[in-house]
Amino acid sequence: MKTLLTFALVFLISFGVKSQEKPTPLYLLFEFMHVEGQHGNDYWDVENFWSGIHKQRVADKSIIGWDLWSLTPSGTEQGSQFLTVTLFSSLENMLKTIQITDIIAYAHKAYPKMTEKELNTMFDKTVKSRDIANQVFLKQVDKTIGDFTMKVGTVGTIDVMKQLDNSYESVESEIFKPWHQEMVSKGKKGNWELLRAIFPAGSEAGVTHITIDMFNDVSQLSSYMESAKGDDMDMKTSLAVIAGIKTRDWKEKKMITLQLMVR
């Protein structure tokens, strides 16, 4: 542990990183959706329908926003094919369970011309078209600084992590973040952020953290992936990175593409 902290200190001194203000708290609900092939068209109808409901939730400030992302690879044996992300301004708002009466009220506001039968058909289609395979409640704990703006078509990668050492978050923020910031400043990626799982928790939980890298498009992502990402690191930095990698188990990486966005 002392060796790891020493490497981190050397890294910070050599790069002259200045302390920055902590980002405004942001809470996120990730819901991984498993959609069978025969329900693909119905699922798109369902999420488009729900996007109208989420617009009403944004309007009354119960949520900040909502996104629908497609996941790649997405084979039948590779888990979920889609990911919805709901953004909240507080932990309390995230943990509140939305009531069915509120959902119905939002639906009537969003679709005033739809009959009760039509609304019930969409709610029924919701249940049949998708399976919420996993839910993860998260808090954003760090991110890079820049002027990147998401839009439909934005691509990114999510890395699912399992913390092995209590220094993991410090390692991400003090060793890896400055390197990500450099990539953002050079225009090689849009941004990077670190999320901490609130629920599920405990030794049996499969994820403790998620890191996200955002890119303007597939061209920027492929260029970034094909570049020699570690060649510009000096020996001290490389040693710090090697030590830092030992603080977590990298479980999985997937590509994400933004399909729908509500703000």
Image (spheres, rainbow, N blue to C red):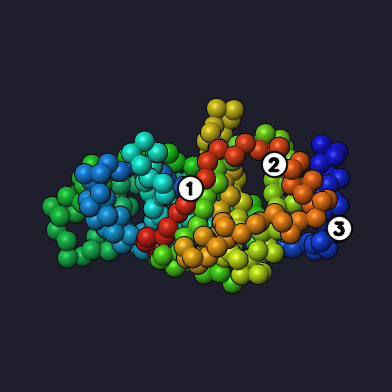
Disc with the residue nearer the chain's start (1 vs 3) = 3
Question: Residues under labels 1 and 3: Cα distance?
Answer: 33 Å
Q: Which of the numbered marks, if any, corresponds to residue 82?
A: none
Query: Horizontal and vertical percent for residue 51?
Result: 33, 60
253 to the left or right of 15:
left
Q: Quadrant of the C terminus?
A: bottom left
Disc with the residue nearer the chain's start (2 vs 3) = 3
Q: Label 2: which residue? A: 245
Of the residues tagged 2 and 3, which is closer to the observer?
2
Q: Secondary structure at mark 3?
A: helix
189 to the left or right of 130:
right
Residue located 61% across and 51% down the image: 194
Query: Horizontal and vertical percent for residue 25?
Result: 61, 56
Disc with the residue nearer the chain's start (2 vs 1) = 2
Residue located 38% across and 42% down the image: 80
Judging depth in this view, the residue of 98 and 236 nearest the camera is 236
Q: Label 3: which residue? A: 13
Residue located 14% across and 58% down the image: 115
Q: Label 1: which residue? A: 254
**Residue 110 seen in the figure:** yes
Q: Amino acid at mark 1?
A: Lys
Q: Amino acid at mark 2?
A: Ile
243 to the left or right of 93:
right
Q: Please say if 156 is above or below 250.
A: below
Q: Amino acid at mark 3?
A: Ile
Query: Horizontal and vertical percent for residue 208?
Result: 59, 39
